[in-house]
Image (cartoon, helix red, strand yellow):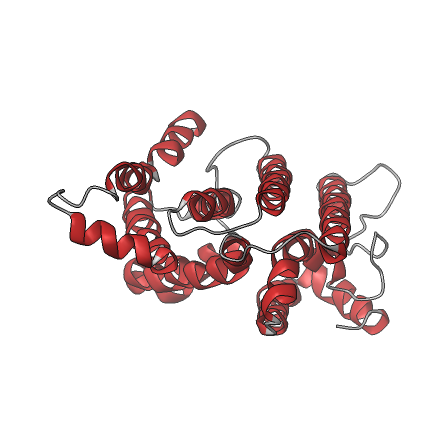
Amino acid sequence: MSLKNVLIAFIAPLPSIFFYIYFLNHHQDNNHLLSFLWNWCDKHPLILANILFFLNIDVGFWLISLLQCSNWMIDLYWTVIPVMLVHYFGSHPAAEYNSWRSMVVVVLTWVWAIRLTHNYLRREKWQCGAREDWRFTDMAKQHGPNWWWVSFFGVYLIQQVFLFGVCLPLYIVHSVNKPLNIWDVIALVICISGIVYAYIADTQLHAFVSNTRTEREGQAMVLILMKACGTILRHQILWVSNYGGGTCVLWLELRRHLGFCWRHHKHLVFGYVDYTCGEKRMLKQEYLGLSLQMYQKHKSV
């Protein structure tokens, strides 16, 4: 099953990749039958990326999920799509950028993706597609026979909004050609710190989850992680592990170039999702509910 899913995951994005390579090889050919299409793609890199995402990921992955009765692949591709996008924006004919800044962002994106992929595979016991995200499983139970079409919006279309929002700085970096300055050094330090901090948080969470699966002889099982590399806020470990490092890597450049404040809305959205999907699920479980309520009294949201 794991080898089959690896093969599916490898083949799934090929339609977009082949189309884009063909576009790069023919976009300057004015005599080509599809020259009007190449001209449009040449002028609208961001829209083109969204169209390819919609057709290949939203529609394509959704159809695969219907055949497999599982939405596992979108979870894995959270680690892959940012890497694909950074190379897409950097290689697009309309790209304009500082080569050193682009190289740094590409390397950081790869390092971030490798860390996240390692965390995904470690969490899944080194199996690919063994299970889907528990939130999707719960949603499927809630929607029953309507889940086959609700999943298109609730799993895939919404991921496009999140992923392109997070990866928008990759487009900005490759559309603004400015010399390197002290802010780039600060951004580099913060990005590396975010990746390292996220790795530590992932490792601590993985160790905690692994230890709770087997109760040690003569000791009571610890149900809630009380101490780790972030004990001020009760969501800090989860936020840093899943969003903090990535936010540092991807959003610092956008803030510096454009001064966008959307990142605050993103944090609010993810924070709300953490509470509604995470804590509410734990409160429903009798053996966790009391421990979580005691934990909530000691840790702020």
Asked if 110 appears above or below 141 in the picture, the reply is above
User: x, y (%) of residue 129?
Assistant: 46, 38
| Residue in the foreground of this view, choosing between 155 and 95 | 95
Residue lying at the far left of the rendered structure: 33
User: x, y (%) of residue 24?
Assistant: 31, 40
Image quadrant in which you'd find residue 13 = top left
User: x, y (%) of residue 205?
Assistant: 74, 47
The structure residue drawn at horizontal position 63% and vertical position 73%, both measured from the top left corner, is: 264
| Residue in the foreground of this view, choosing between 290 and 199 | 199
State whether residue 284 appears in this view: no
Asked if 84 appears above or below 246 in the picture, the reply is above
User: x, y (%) of residue 146?
Assistant: 29, 64
The structure residue drawn at horizontal position 48% and vertical position 52%, both measured from the top left corner, is: 96
Image quadrant in which you'd find residue 88 = top left
Residue lying at the far top of the rendered structure: 3
Q: Image quadrant for the C terminus?
A: bottom right
The structure residue drawn at horizontal position 53% and vertical position 53%, both measured from the top left corner, is: 170
Left or right for 103, reference 56? right
Residue lying at the far right of the rendered structure: 218
